[in-house]
Image: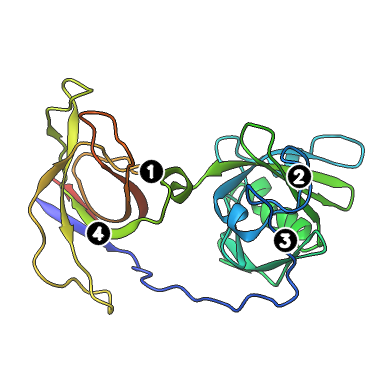
Amino acid sequence: MRFHLLLLPLALAACAATPAADSTRATAPGGAASGTASGPATPDAALLAGYHWQLTQATNRLGQRIAALFVRPDKPLELDFGSDRISVRNSCNGMGGNYRIVNGQLVVGPMMHTMMACANLMLNRLDGLIGERLSSRPTIAVTRSGGAPQLQLRTGGDTLVFTGVPTPETRYGGPGVTEFLEVAPQAVPCNHPLMPGAQCLDVREVHYGANGLKTGAPGNWHLLLQGIEGYTHQPGTRNVLRVQRYTVRNPPADTPASAYVLDMVVESEIATH
C-alpha cells in the first residue's frame, strides 16, 4: 500500500488594512442606515459581513437578463465582505480588494486576483465582467422585508441583486474556534440518535505551531456524530482539515452542542493498492 501526500499552505495569518477615513456607514437598528426596515438602505460593515451575498438577478437598462453573469447555476457569483475588504468567489479566479462606502456608493480599490486560466471561455470572461461593475462605483443598498436580505448594486444602467446567505457566525451567534482535525480514511458505523445505521467520521485533533509545522501529540480518536459542514468524505482518503467549531445554543435533545464548519483542507493522503 502506497500513500501520496499533498500538503497545502496553512495560511495561519491574514493581513489587515486600515479602513478609509471617508467611509460613510451610518447604522440603524437591524444593521441598516436611514430608510424603513423593508425599504432600501445603505448597509453598514457589520450587516455586509454577516452574509455570503449570492447573485440571483442581473438586468441591463432595458430590463433584460445579463446571462453572461450566470455561468454556473450551481455556483453563483458570491461577494463576501470583511471590515474593509471585499472578495469575489465562484468566478474563474479568486478576487479581492479594499472597499469603502461613500455617499451610498460602493468604492472598490484595485483588486488582487489569482492568474488561473479557465477552459470554459464564459467562465474566463466572468472575472472582467464582475470586476468592471464593481470598479464603477455602483450605488449600494440592502432591503430587508421579512425574508433573506437582498443587496442591490446599480451601475451603468445595470442592476445586480444578491441574496444574503447567513455566515456561520450569524447562524450560531458568534465567532468560531479554529481547530485542526485529522479524519481517518474510513468512516465508522455509529449509534446516531437520529439516523439508524449511520456512518460517522473518525477524527482526532492535531496541533500546529506558528511556523506551520505540527507540534505535540495528537488527541484521541473519536467519532464525530454531527459531521463537518462543507466537507464530503471520500472513502480511503485521510485528510487534515482546518475547521471552525461553533457552540450551538440550546441544542435539541440527543444532539451535539458543537457544530463544525470546514475552513480548508490542509493535508490529503490517498491510499492506493
Give the secondary structure at mark 1.
Answer: loop
Quarter of the picture holding the C terminus: top left
Q: Residue 251 lies in what quarter of the image? A: top left
Q: Which mark is residue 160?
A: 2
**Nearer mark to the viewer, of 1 and 3:** 3
Q: Which residue is mark 1?
A: 230
Mark 2 to mark 1: distance in Å? 27 Å
Which amino acid type corresponds to the residue marked 4 in the rendered image? Phe
Determine if residue 123 is in view. yes
Give the secondary structure at mark 3.
Answer: loop
Pinpoint residue 119: horizontal percent, then vertical percent.
58, 50
Q: Residue at x 22, y 22 (%)?
A: 195
Q: Which residue is mark 4?
A: 180
For the residues labelled 4 and 3, say whether their Cβ atoms are less than 8 Å apart: no
Which amino acid type corresponds to the residue marked 3 in the rendered image? Ala
**Residue 199 higher or lower than 33, as above or below:** above
Pinpoint residue 40: horizontal percent, then vertical percent.
78, 44
For the residues labelled 2 and 1, say whether their Cβ atoms are less than 8 Å apart: no
User: How would you rate the neighbour count of disc 4 (Cα within 10 Å): few for under 14, some for 14-19, many for 20 or more?
Assistant: many
Q: Which residue is mark 3?
A: 26
User: How would you rate the neighbour count of disc 3 (Cα within 10 Å): few for under 14, some for 14-19, many for 20 or more?
Assistant: some
Give the secondary structure at mark 2.
Answer: strand
User: How would you rate the neighbour count of disc 2 (Cα within 10 Å): few for under 14, some for 14-19, many for 20 or more?
Assistant: many
108, 112: nearer the viewer: 108
